[in-house]
Structure formats: C-alpha cells, structure tokens
Amino acid sequence: MKKLSVGILAIVLAFSFASCSTNETGLETPQAPLLKQVQLKRDASGAYSVDYVVASNTLPDVHKNMNSLMNEVHLNKVSQDTKDQYRNDFMLDNNTLRIGFFDNETGKQMKFSIEDENITFAKGSTTKFLKEYKLSTNKDGSIQLDFEVNNNIKTEFVFNKDSATYEVHLSKGTSSDSKFSRTLTVPDTGVLKLDFVNHNLLGKGLAESTSTIPRVIIVSSE
C-alpha cells in the first residue's frame, strides 16, 4: 500500500510539473500584433489616404483627438468575424496631418506626422516636382518608399547623417525615369524621417532656393 501511494504521488507531481511548464510556455508566447501592414499615400490630387491590414477578429475605432489633433486608429480584438483590410481618407489641417495606430492588445503604436501644402490653395506649386508618393511597412520592419515625379525632374537620394533624415532631392533637368522605389531602414531610435527637398531656380544668374515639402516622420514604439 505504501508503494502504491508513492506511485500515485509521483504521477500527481509529474502532471503538476507538466501543467506548470505548459502555463509558463503560454505566458512567454508574445502576443501577435493586430496591425499587420500600413500604407500611407498621397495621390496626384494631393489627397491623403491610409490602407491597412489587420489580424483576424480585429475592429478599428477611428476618430480625431481634438486635443492633439491626431487622427487615431484604435485596434481592438473582438469575438465576431471582421474584415482584414481597411481604408481611411484624411485631410490636411493647416498643412499638417497626424495619424496614429494604437494596438490595444499589445500596446504597440505607430504614428505618422506629415507636413505638406494643400495643392488646391498652393495653386499647384507642390506638383512642380513630386507627383505622388506612398510609404508601406515591410515584414522585416523596414519602410518601402515608392514615388513618381513629373517629366524632366532629376532625382538624388541622400541620407543626412547630421539630422538622421532620408532626403529625396528634386530639381529640373533631363531624366528618362519618373518612378522610383527605395527601401528605408528604420534607425534604432524607432524614428524614421523623410524629406522631399525641392530645388528652385529663381532666375538666370540668381541664387537657388529650396523648399522641403512634403516632410514625413514615422515613429514606432512598443
């Protein structure tokens, strides 16, 4: 009888350890993010939009924070079936646009800050060089930049180490290419900065002027 009791105790202890091990493994498994991919786009008319892909059973709550003036997209896990792709259109507010994605399951955030001119009120000056652009997140954490310029626009890519900013320099000149694509690596700080630098000639023999529009900052945080 004593040997039988010891055997039963050993079996109970074995199941207990197995249960603990399973629970610990479950606790260590990271929560999958609800936001899978984002694409920010400005089309040739100057309109901004965001297309994004979310995990299953994820519902976005989109509203504007009147204190920060940020367009917030809160992602929540729900029990019912939902779409996995969404699109929202946004408008510049005093030449600025702020969009934030907030994962209410993992706490992760991604924020976009844009400075640009409203083409309607700028009388088309913003389309002199840049026609349209889009920024998309990649699975490896990098950002894909795709953009199109008008005819006869020279394009030069520069990384400004002093300001840690990717720069796209645009100027009048002969060029056979109008569409470009680059993969941008996000710095360890989690802050990616992108400037489109437009070079304008004021006239023959006059100095060159530059305008930096649009400007984009993407901030990713846990």
Image: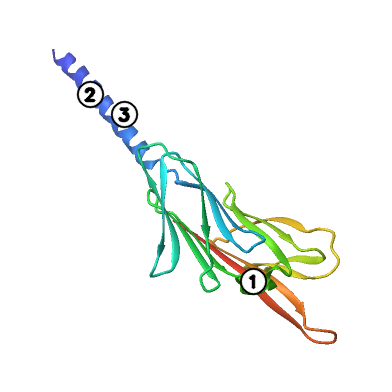
State the SS at label 2: helix
Among numbered discs 2 and 3, the one appearing first in the sequence: 2
The image quarter containing residue 64 is bottom left
**Which label sits on residue 53?**
none
Residue topped by disc 3: 18
Instruction: Name the residue located 75 percent from the left edge and 56 percent from the top edge.
Output: 179
Residue topped by disc 1: 213
Instruction: Name the residue located 70 percent from the left edge and 68 percent from the top edge.
Output: 127
**What is the CA distance from the residue labelled 2 to the residue labelled 3?**
10 Å
Residue topped by disc 2: 12
Does residue 54 appear anywhere in the picture? yes
Quarter of the image containing the C terminus? bottom left
State the SS at label 3: helix
Nearer the observer: mark 3 or 1; the answer is 1
**What is the CA distance from the residue labelled 2 to the residue labelled 1?**
69 Å
Q: In this view, does 9 lie above or below 113?
A: above
Image side of residue 26 versus residue 196, left or right:
left
- Snapshot colouring: rainbow
Instruction: Please state which amino acid type lies under the numbered disc 1.
Output: Ile
Among numbered discs 3 and 1, the one appearing first in the sequence: 3
Image side of residue 196 versus residue 171, left or right:
left
The image quarter containing residue 30 is top left
Q: Is residue 190 above or below residue 52?
A: below
Instruction: Please state which amino acid type lies under the numbered disc 3.
Output: Ala
